[in-house]
Amino acid sequence: MKKTLFLASILGLLVNTQANNSTKIVDSKIKDVTVYRQQAKVSNEATVSLNAGTTEIVFKDISTQMNPNSIQVAVKGDITLLAARYETNYLNKNEMPPRIKIVYDSLELLSDKVAWNNQLLKLYTDEESILEANKSLSNEKINFTAADVKALADMYRARKLELHEKAFSIAKQQKSMNETIQNLQAQLTEWNAKNNQSSGQIILSVSTNASLSGAIKCTYIVNNAGWIPIYDLRSEGWGKPIDLIYKANIYQNTGYSWEDINLTICTGNPTLNNNKPILNPVYINFVNYEITQSRTKSLDYKSYGLTAGQMNAPTYGYADKLEEKDFEAAKPLEGITTENMLNEEFKLKQVQTIESDGKYHLVNMNSYSLPATYEYQTIPKLDQAAFLLAKVSDYGKYNLIPGDANIFLEGSYIGQSVINPFTMGDTMILSLGRDEGITVKRTKLLEFCKTKWIDTKKSETFAYEITIKNNKSSEITIDVLDQIPISKTDDIKVEIEEMSGAIYIEELGKLNWKLTIPASTTKKVKLIYTLKYPKDKSVIETSY
């Protein structure tokens, strides 16, 4: 009781002090959020009524995940910003979302009920112990008749039965309530809910020449938020364009849900180092070896940390005088994309709600119809299957970033692939999956494989046959790729005996057959090559 009164007096003192200093605590609302690859930019807006002179304005319920150095302030009206700073308020706890508050209240009620049932169980147990201690009829001064014994036994049995029934009923209740408590706690864990979190607040010092009504917007960067790209690639078949749906998986765990906000998704990343690298000279000299006696020498390091005064210094933002039309909430266009000097922004048409639960929330950003050319490709040495590829040229104008892609072909989900535009050259090649209508086999031709020794040399011949069968009802064109090893020494010679008209890229050891195969037709190609090297040596294929 004393602690409660003491805390109340402190709060009252704080309120009185704030009132004497012309402090206004305002309720602000998150209106706009720009989500970066990591972090997010949040804008809180509030309307204010100010008297002439200097006023301290407190934006309460600000995420403790904010970066105090990122505060920016914009005003509407004849308001001058004098200072801005951020503080953590340990007395004013973060207000829980309604659904989480319901769960916490339910947990509290159930916990109280469980505690009370435990007290009842103890009471019944104690009463049963008393009965057990007094069930003996032996007494030198009292003579018990048979009727007395029967009456006492009936009473003992009835009361014991009653106590056991009550204990059994309470045990069933306890089991049910404990299961419910576990489910509620699991749900809170699923929502990543935290009770009694401290909240932040932005404190502004402003000045006006006359009494007025205006508006203030505070913008700041928060951690524990971001997004990752994900794509849907849809094709209706050969010769049709690729429909690319660009999506964002947004997450945030800032402590406050973003409800009905204007959402912008940006490809930028404020966490990256923005300082350009400096190429310093590198010198080379001879290495001098000398033997020296080992000794220990202490080193003095200069500290460049902040002083106590610097650490507690207020952080100042900047204020923009905005015209009335500039401060009004803009009406975003559907699918509008803005490209600035460093990144790209996607402004969504409809307002969005992103819960503060750390989970992914999927939103569509944009969609494109990509003109594509199709072809089949197989590398039977690695995988005896034919893959359908879609080639998209001039893809740079879409400003894609690396991410996973879900592939749908003719309405069916094929699987996942990866889009990485940074490593694709001038043409983006999308793998649309295996085509089971094409059979591929690569077999070793043992009759051509042989080993010979001539003088000091050894020669080994390798032979393979690749068979492609088109089981489809239409003609196909397919690229067939294979390879021969590349010699890294003059002592190893590689000679191609047969390659069935393949295009040979010598520096890569790559062979490419471009085959046109009519419906229900099979084509075969052969690859035969010979290795020659000293017979007292062994060779091995490597990737380096």
Image (cartoon, rainbow, N blue to C red):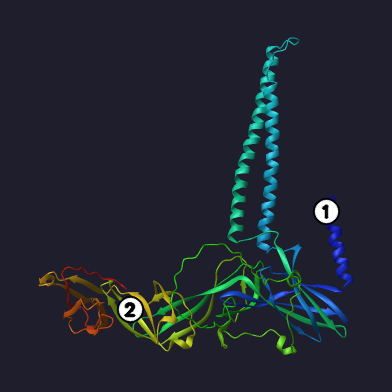
Image position of 498 (left or right of 293): left
Residue 252 spot, x, y in % from top left: 60, 69
Q: Nearer the viewer, mark 1 or mark 2?
A: 1
Q: Which mark is residue 4?
A: 1
Image position of 74 (left or right of 301): right
Pointer 1 or 2: first along the chain: 1
Question: What's the amino acid at mark 2?
Answer: Leu
Residue 8 spot, x, y in % from top left: 84, 58
Question: Could you tell me if residue 533 is visible in this image?
Answer: yes
Question: What's the amino acid at mark 1?
Answer: Thr
**Residue at 84% across / 73% down in the picture?**
23
Q: CA distance from mark 1 to mark 2?
A: 72 Å
**Residue at 62% across / 85% down in the picture?**
332
| Nearer to the camera, 423 or 441 | 423
Residue 538 spot, x, y in % from top left: 21, 68
Instruction: Please tell me how crowded label 1 is: few (under 14), some (14-19), or many (20+) other residues with Cα within 10 Å.
Output: few
What residue did someone put label 2 on? 388
Compared to residue 302, the image places residue 169 above or below, namely above
Looking at the rendering, which quadrant does residue 136 occupy? top right
Q: Split into 4 quadrants, where in the image is the C terminus?
A: bottom left
